[in-house]
Image (tube, rainbow, N blue to C red):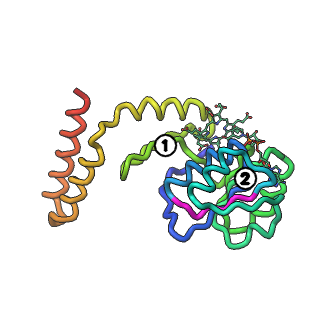
Amino acid sequence: MNYLPIFLNMKNKKVLVIGGGEVAHRKVLSLLKFTKDIMIVSSHIKTELKMTINKYSLIYLQDNYNSKYLEKIDILIVAVDDLKLQKNIYEETKDKKIMCNFSDFEEYCDFILPSYIKKDDLVVCVSTMGSAPAFAKEFKKYIEKLIPNDIDCFLKQMKDLRTTLPKGKKRMDLLRQKAQKYIQNFKQ
Ligand SMILES: C[C@@]1(CC(=O)O)C2=NC(=C\c3[nH]c(c(CCC(=O)O)c3CC(=O)O)Cc3[nH]c(c(CC(=O)O)c3CCC(=O)O)/C=C3\N/C(=C\2)[C@@H](CCC(=O)O)[C@]3(C)CC(=O)O)/[C@H]1CCC(=O)O
Ligand SMILES: NC(=O)c1ccc[n+]([C@@H]2O[C@H](COP(=O)([O-])OP(=O)(O)OC[C@H]3O[C@@H](n4cnc5c(N)ncnc54)[C@H](O)[C@@H]3O)[C@@H](O)[C@H]2O)c1
């Protein structure tokens, strides 16, 4: 598979998650760092997901999937344990302007979720293009240990310089040198 890693502006994007099990919960948690505009429709729901829904005041409708829920949404995550239903939903969405993710059918996905670390403005994503999710998760943990605790402070300093100094070669050189020096220091 060939997925382009891009960062999507989530402002005004409506997300619908169908399913209330472990996979739905994991994906809701992944989305929550970037948006709270998430609605969950599921016939049943696991306690852990229910707790997350309450904690973040998300919308939950206890219902079976129905195509009426596809109206006015931008992003769809299908995490039901019914492969035939996943196929039906794919048929219903493929000509709509909805970005879809299906938990069992990578070939139907417009996007897949990466394993990621988010520390303030630093986001590091790991993907294996669907080949080995378990490896993506473990490799993320490995990379996480390399990130220094003061990273947010360093990034704030860099942002301040970028926004106060005039644009141009001098600023670019300074920022590049600062980044190189910072990385050099934490490698030692
Ligand atoms: C990264 C992460 C993000 C997230 O979900 O938020 C994620 N899977 C995670 C964990 C994980 N998933 C699975 C295991 C068990 C071990 C194993 O199978 O490896 C573990 C490990 C565990 O749980 O410990 C099983 C699994 N996963 C998929 C299938 C279906 C299939 O392959 O057809 C099956 C088999 C179902 C079965 O056989 O029954 C499919 C997908 N999983 C993806 C993402 C996308 C590709 C990511 C990539 O680029 O590699 C993709 C294609 C679609 C998508 O979901 O978007 C998250 C780690 C979060 C973290 O960092 O903590
Ligand atoms: N993509 C991944 O990372 C990944 C990982 C593991 C498993 N999976 C696959 O994802 C699917 C879901 O896994 P899970 O562990 O969350 O399963 P689960 O059984 O815990 O949850 C399935 C959910 O779907 C809901 N559901 C079923 N039919 C429905 C319908 N008609 N309308 C609304 N809701 C309905 C159920 O109420 C339940 O909450 C499985 O098919 C599994 O093979 C994907």
Left or right of residue 166, residue 79 in this image = right
User: Who's the residue at 25% across and 57% down the image?
Assistant: 159
| Mark 2 in CB contact with mark 1 (< 8 angstroms) | no
User: Who's the residue at 84% across and 52% down the image?
Assistant: 85
**Span colored in magenta:** 35-41
User: Who's the residue at 59% across and 31% down the image?
Assistant: 134
User: Who's the residue at 67% across and 52% down the image?
Assistant: 101
Q: Which residue is mark 2?
A: 78
Q: Nearer the viewer, residue 176 or 53?
A: 53
Instruction: Tell me the amino acid under the disc marked 2.
Output: Val
Q: Which residue is mark 1?
A: 116
Query: For the residue carrying disc 1, how many other residues have a C-alpha within 10 Å: few (<14), some (14-19), or many (20+)?
Result: some
Looking at the rendered structure, the secondary structure element under dot 2 is strand
Cβ of mark 1 under 8 Å from ligand 1: the answer is yes
Which x, y percent locates residue 81?
Answer: 80, 44
Badge number at residue 52 = none
